[in-house]
Structures are given as structure tokens and as C-alpha cells.
Image (spheres, rainbow, N blue to C red):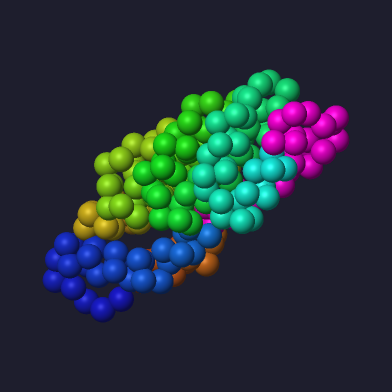
Amino acid sequence: MEHYETDEQRGEAFKNWLLKNSGVVLLGVAIGIGGIYASNHFRDKNTKSASLNGEVFGQLLKASEQNDSSKMDQLAASFKNTKDDAGYWDLTQLNLAKLKLEQGHLGDAIVTLKALASGSVDTSIQALAQYRIGLIYFEQNKAVEALSSLSLINVKSFQGIRKELEGDIYLSQAKVTEAIDAFKMAKNLGNTSALLKIKFANLGLDFLENDNKIVLSE
């Protein structure tokens, strides 16, 4: 990254680079994580007997493939969030939020994800929902709301990507020192993504420099 006189100029330049080069990547990461958890849950559910929710979920997937938002809303509203079928409910909300996001209805996507974060019994799903909420708020230039959502993530495996996104948010505010600290913590928490390495390079940081590795308790 070329030289800039102030942190404000440097932060604004990096934000422009980030939005130009990695916005889609960040969104893809979030959706990709959701796909991993979704497939795991669905495999678990396939080992159990079919239920009414299972039938509804099949209809919902079909509506999702057809980009039928109104049908998905109708099916999601009829879905029962029960202990036995909690996985189906989680996947319903994830797919509904994904469709809302793809259609540009960011506010509706946030509402769905907040319901998922508060209603799911799976801590990984809760963390995924909070991460996506933070990502959407960041896209909307709502830094305070984005950081607030990310602060609710307590799952160990999400801390690396959480801190990376926090670094992106700080840079968008021209808070370069805070951003560097967040990126370094992301690395120390095990985040070794190619995108994070690019951010290190653009900030003039050595990704291979030894730092004290952070170990989180379970």
C-alpha cells in the first residue's frame, strides 16, 4: 500500500481496497461456513425418522432454489422450533436469511439472523448468525452495531475470523492501531487465511513474525 500522511487517509484507502477486492470473499466465507454447518446438521437429521418439519424443510429448499421469497416466508412461519427438530429450524432460518441477503433485503436478513441467534440451541449456529449480522452491518457502514454483534460470539472456533472482521471494521474507521491489534490477534488465534496475509502485507506487517499464541479455554 502506498504512503499516506495520516491514519485517516490510510484507513480510508484500505477500506476502499477491501470493499473492492474482498467484499465478495467475506460474504462467501460466511455463506461457506453456513454450508458446512448446514450439511453436517442435515446428515445428522437424515439418520432419524422423517417428521413434519422434515417435509416442510424439503419444500423450503425447493422454494429457495426457485428464489421464491414469499413461499419461503410462508413455510418458515409455519415451522416448529422443537427440541427434536431444532436442526431443521436452524437450517430454515439460515436459508431464509441467505435468500434475503442475495435479494438485497439486508434488514430482513438481519431480523432472521437475530431470531436464529436467540432461538437456536446450537452454539456454533448462534456464533455463525452473529458473525453474519456483523458482516451485514459492516456492509451498511454501521461499525458500532457490527462490533456489538461480533462481541457476542463466544465459540472458540469463530474467534479467528471474528477478530479479522473486527480489524476490517476498525480500518474503515481509520483506527489503524486497533485494526493491527485485531489482525495480529486473529493470526494468533489460528486464522491463517490468504486474505488475512494480504491485509498484513498491505499494512507493512510481517505475517511470519513470532507473536505469543493465544490459547482460549473451552
Q: In percent of the image, x 26 and y 78: which residue is there?
A: 2
Can residue 210 be seen at all in this image of the molecule? no
Placement of 34 over or under 54, stated as above or below:
below
Placement of 146 over or under 197, stated as above or below:
above
Residue 81 picture quarter:
top right
Main secondary-structure element of the magenta-colored stretch:
helix
Q: In percent of the image, x 34 and y 47: which residue is there?
A: 137
Placement of 2 over or under 75, stated as above or below:
below
| Residue closest to the far bottom | 2
Q: In percent of the image, x 36 and y 71: which residue is there?
A: 20
Judge by depth and name the residue closer to the eye, 6 or 114: 114
> Is residue 36 found inside the magenta-colored segment of the image?
yes
Q: In percent of the image, x 72 and y 43: which residue is there?
A: 58
If the image is split into quadrants, where does the N terminus sit? bottom left
Bounds of the magenta segment: 29-56
Judge by depth and name the residue closer to the eye, 218 or 120: 120
